[in-house]
Image: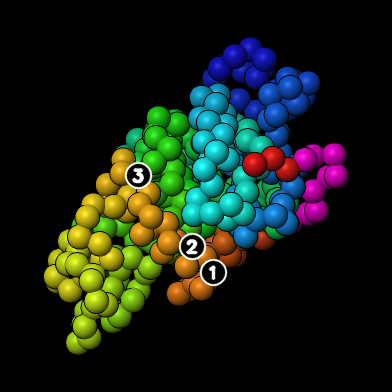
Amino acid sequence: MPSKLGCCSNKCRQLQIDPAYAQQQQLALSTSSVQASSQCQFNVLMMTDHYKGIDTLKQYKQQYSKAPEPAKGSFCFTEVVYVADKFSCDGNDGALECNWQNAAEYSWTEGFDFIVMMSKQGAANVLGGIMHINSSQSYAVFLHELMHFNGFEDEYVLAEQKQQWLCNQQGLVAPNLFIANEVSPPKGWQKSIACSNKKAYKPSPNWSIMQYQTMSLSEQYRELWQKQINQPLTKPIRFSEYFAFLGLKPVFTTASKEHKFSD
């Protein structure tokens, strides 16, 4: 990690970063120093624990701003917030995970729906309104995970534990997943490999971004995504709700006026 960030070990702390350098790099140093926007339907807090993550998140934001998905005004993203090791993220054993119990020790700005937490390694996933993603993953993976915020399901074989409850439901359980338990699938929908009980259907016979993360977003799925935002099947889970589920009571504050929102 560069010297201007003030450290090079796993015990980097925010207080060691030169504030002037952070301002020059459009880098926030606190989860309470960024501001939500009224211009978008969802506000996303962008966070990372390492230097490469800063650049990668900025690249994601830049690419998104050139072609907002599923439409302009859907998502707004903050400046990147450098959080060092405060959430102890680890992806050595597969899926990237963080210790969100520490969230209760910090102040958070009101008005945010989701978090993108970028660490060095580990498989990308979304849990409780929080996207965990590593800095080596492509923008297509980022979009795939972003769709999970709005309730889209993976179209590859789902984890057995998830299948046990999801695949035994009935009807439309996600914008892209229909379970045909004693009901007929929508016209034009095709068999999906998501459920081992062979009762799952997806909107298209073609591969999609929800099955292969390197695929581009098709117009059909873009329309489904926009419809889900405008007329959601279920309410999106916000990270504040997940914190409450964990029994956490972090402080939520109004952002300082001197910190501007950026998209």
Quarter where residue 260 is shown: top right
Q: Is residue 154 visible?
A: yes
The residue singled out by tag 1 in the image is 230
- The kind of secondary structure element at disc 1 is helix
- Residue 175: x and y in percent read 38, 68
Q: CA distance from mark 1 to mark 2?
A: 6 Å
Residue at 70% from the left image edge and 29% from the top image edge: 26
Magenta range is: 251-260
Q: Is residue 253 magenta?
A: yes
What residue did someone put label 3 on? 216
Q: Earlier in the sequence, mark 1 or mark 3?
A: 3
- Residue type at mark 2 is Gln
Residue 125 shows up from this direction: no
Name the dominant secondary structure of the magenta segment.
loop
The answer to whether the residue labelled 1 contacts the one labelled 3, judged by CB atoms less than 8 Å apart, is no
Tag 3: residue type?
Ser
Tell me if residue 199 comes above or below residue 252 in the rendering.
below
Q: Residues within 10 Å of mark 1 (few under 14, many from 20)?
A: few
Of 239 and 78, nearer the camera is 78
The first of marks 2 and 3 along the sequence is 3
Residue receiving disc 2: 226
Circle 3 sits in a helix, a strand or a loop, which is it? loop
- How far apart in space, not on screen, are marks 1 and 3 (Cα)? 22 Å
Q: Residue 144's spot in the image, x, y percent?
A: 39, 49
Q: CA distance from mark 2 to mark 3?
A: 16 Å
